[in-house]
Amino acid sequence: MVTQLGTYDDSLDFGSLNLAKSVGICLGSRLERLQGKKVIFSDEERSLVPIDGWGTRSSPYCATTITTIAPLMENTIIASVDSSSIQVAETEEGALYGVKCGIALAFGGHSLMHFKIGPILFYLTEEAAKDSKLDSRLAKLVLLDGDYAKRLLRVRVERVVQTELSAHLVGSVLLVDGSLRSSIFEDQDNSMAKIAENCTLYRNKLVGISKSTKFKILDRISAPLAKVPSPAFIEVGMVIKSLVRNSIGSNLLVKFERSSPVLRADVVGNCEESLGRILGNDSVARGYPETLRLAHHISTFTATEVTCLKSHILTKYDVTELATEDIRRTLLSSISV
Amino acid sequence: MQILSKTGNELALLALKSDLASKGDYLLIEDEKSKRKMIVQVFDEEYLSSQALLEDIVKDEVVNASSNENLHDPLNIGILSRMIRDARIFKAKIRAAVNQYGKLSSDITWLPSRVDSRVRLLGISELCGFLGRSGVLPIPVGKSASKGSEEDFEIYAEDLDGRLNIITGKKESGKSHLSKMLVKTLIKHGAFVVVFDLNNEYSGLAWNKDGSPSDVQKKIMILEPGKGLRFSLRYCGKAAISDMLKNALDMPAASLREFFRIWDWLENKQSLGIDAIGNAINTWNINELVRDALVSRYHVIQASGLFADNEEACFQFENAINHNNGLAIIINMGRVGPTVRRMIVEIVLSKLVDLLEQGKIHPIFLFAEEAHLYIRDTYWEDIITRMRHFGIYTTFITNQPDAIGDGVYRQVDNIFLFNFTNDSDLDKISRVSLADNDTIRSIVRTLPQRYCLAIGKVVCDLPIVIKVAQSEVLTLGETKKFFKKSA
C-alpha cells in the first residue's frame, strides 16, 4: 500500500503471526475445553458468584461432615470491626491517606450501639517512614505503592481496635471482616496472633468472615452445604492450610441462613458455639451478620467526607491546590477507557 | 456566598446555613478586579443536592435509626459534613448593575468573576441609595423583610400620585391593613381620598386601638346612604343621574327619554326634586309600560335614601374638600344592596369627574375595595384612562386578581402583592404583573401574613418584600362569628 509518506515493508504481516502458538509454548489456550461449560462473565470491580452455585459436582477434596448451627440464645456481646482507607492527596514528598474504622455492637438480638472512628489523616513520606519502626523493605513498599500504604494503615488501625476489644470484652464474640491471617503490615504488639491470644485469655470468640474468597476450590467444596436447609458449616482447614501458611484458627465454610450465600469463616474457639452465639445475638439478614454490615457502612468513606477532608486540608495546613488532569484521558482522548 | 452558575438572567449562589438571606433579599456581588457590582435578588432557596449527598443522608439516617452512635472524630470532619448537608443554593435574578463610577446601570450583560467576586447582603437603605429613591412626603409602611437586617421602609406619596395601584392577596393576608395605612398617611400629607368601603372598616381610621381619637380623626368623613351621603338632583346633574339610571338601574332608552322630559319640565318650573319627579311620573301622559319602568326605578331611587330635596342638608364634595387640608371621605357600603352600591359608585364617580373637569376640586385618591362587585365592566377602562387624566388616582384592593381585567394590569403603576397560594391566582398575577414569573410565584407563595411584595414605581421597579407595620388604628370589619373563642 502506498501512502503519502511512502511505502512500508510488505513483509510486515501481522496476519501470519501465530500468537496462539507463541503463548501456547508456556500456556495452552485450550478453548476446545470451554465447550458446554457453565460460565459467569467477570466484572473487575465486583465479585460475582452464580446465584444457584456452580452445580452439584462436588470436589474430591470435599469434606463430607456438615455441622448444623443452632442459635445459642445466651446473651453475648457481638462486636464487629471494619475499616477503610483512601488516598486523599499527593505531594512531591509523599501521600496523604485517610482511615476510618467502624465498630458495631449487638446484644441479645438487638443492635446496641456503634462507634465511628475517624476519619484520621496520615501523611506518609520517606522521612516519616525513616522515623517509623517500619521495616525498611516494608517502608519502601508502602512508599512506592499506594495500595500497600492504604492496606498498611487499614490493618494497623483495625488491629489496634481489635486488640483493645479483645482485651476489654469478656465472653463475647469479636467479628472481623476477612480471614484471620497474620499480615506483614501488622505490628507485633497488635498482631492477629496477639488478638487471638487475648480472645482465648478473656474467653472471647474470634470470628473472621470473608465475603468472597479467591480460592476457587472452595466453591466446589461448598456445594453440599448449599443443599442443607438450615444454618450449617463445614471444616475446610485441610484445604486452606495447604494453600495459606499464616491462617489462624479453624477454617470453615459457613451458611447462616437457609438459602444464603456460603461464606468463608475462620474461628478461634469452639466453632459451633461461636457461630451459634452469632446467630443468637445478632440479626443475620441475607446470610451476613448485621453488626458486620453496619461496621462496614460506618467505616466506608462517603463522597461528602472526602470533600470535607479536602476542605480540612486546604484550610488547616495552608497547602496550595494545583490544577490536575487525568493523564489517561488526556493521552487517550475523550473515549472513556 | 459563592457564585455557582448563571442561566439567562438567573444566578445560582452557593451559601452556608450561616449566610443570612431569604427570599426577596437583595445581594450585592462585588467584582473586586473589574470594580463593578451586580445587584441580584434572591427569589428561591433550595438545598445543595447531589446524589452522593442524598445517599449519605439516607445512609446516616438508617444507621442511626438502627443503633446509637458514638463518634470519635479527631479532625472534626463531622462539622464540615453537616455544613455541606445544610449548604443551600440561592437562586437570584439579576436586577441591575453598578458601574465603576458607582452609578446604577441596566447593563447586565457582563458576568461577575466567580473567583474575585464577593457576595454580601444589600441592605434596603443601601439599595435605595443606589436607586436614588427620594421624596418629600414619606409613607412609612413597615420594615424591609430582610433576614439579615430589618430596616424601616417607606414609600413616597409622590409615587402614588397620578398612579394606578393594586393591592391584592388572599383573604386575611393584610391588604386592607396596608390600604388603611396608605389612606391615613395620604390625608396626613393633605391629600383627598375617597374610599368605597365594602365592609364598613375604614371608619376605624378615626380611632386608635385603645379607643382614643386618632391623629387623623378630624380628617375622616364617614358617609352612609341616607346618613350624610345624600345628594340633591340639581347637584348631581342630568349626566350623573343618566349614568346611574342607565348603568346601575338598567333603564331602557325609551324610559330614559321620558324621564328626562319630566326632568326638563320640572327644571323649567324650578321645582326639580325627588317628590316632584314621583308625582310627575304618576300623572305624566306616557305609555303604561314606560310608566311602570319609571315607577319601579323611582321606588329604588327613593328607597336608596341617596337623594333629598333639601339642598342644604345634601352633601357636596367641593364643600367638604375645599374646606379641609387632607380628608378621607369614607363611603360605607356594607349595609346596602348591590343595586344601591352601583348607584352610589355611578353618582360619585360621575360627580367627581364633573367637578374635576370644572376644576372645582383637587385631584383625589380613590380606594376601591373589591371593586368588581360594584363597578360595571365597561367602567374599568374609563377609570384607568379618562378619570386618571381628570385627577382620580385609583387603588384597587381585591382578593380576586382574576376579577381585574388584563387591561387594568397593563396600565398599573404599583402592585402590592400579599400572599397567594392558589395556583390560578398566582398564574394570573405572574402573567400580568410588572415582575417576572419566577419572582412572583416563588416569593408570593411563601409570604407570611402582613408581608407584601411591592412592585412598581414606589420601589423604582425593583421588587421589595415589605413587612407591613402593625396597625395603630381600630380594626373594624372583622367577620362576625357565632362561636366565641374562650379566653
Image (cartoon, rainbow, N blue to C red):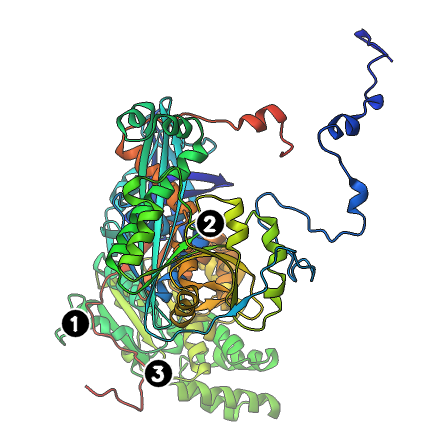
Which circle marks residue B309 in the picture? 3
- Where residue A166 sits in the image (x, y, percent)? 29, 55
Residue B392: % across, % down: 39, 60
Identify which residue, B72 or A289, lies in the foreground.
Answer: A289
Picture quarter containing residue A331?
top right
| Earlier-in-chain disc, 3 versus 1 | 1
Numbered label attached to residue B52: 2
Residue at mark 1 to residue at mark 2: CA–CA distance: 58 Å
Q: For numbered disc 3, what is the local secondary structure?
A: loop
Residue B19 in view, yes or no: no
Residue mark closest to the camera, 1 vs 2: 2
* Above or below, A56 relative to A195: below
Mark 3 and mark 1 in contact? Answer it, CB < 8 Å. no
The answer to which quarter of the image holds residue B273 is bottom left
Q: Earlier in the sequence, mark 2 or mark 3?
A: 2
Read off the chain for label 1. Answer: B
- SS assignment at label 1: loop
Question: Is the same chain shared between marks 2 and 3?
Answer: yes
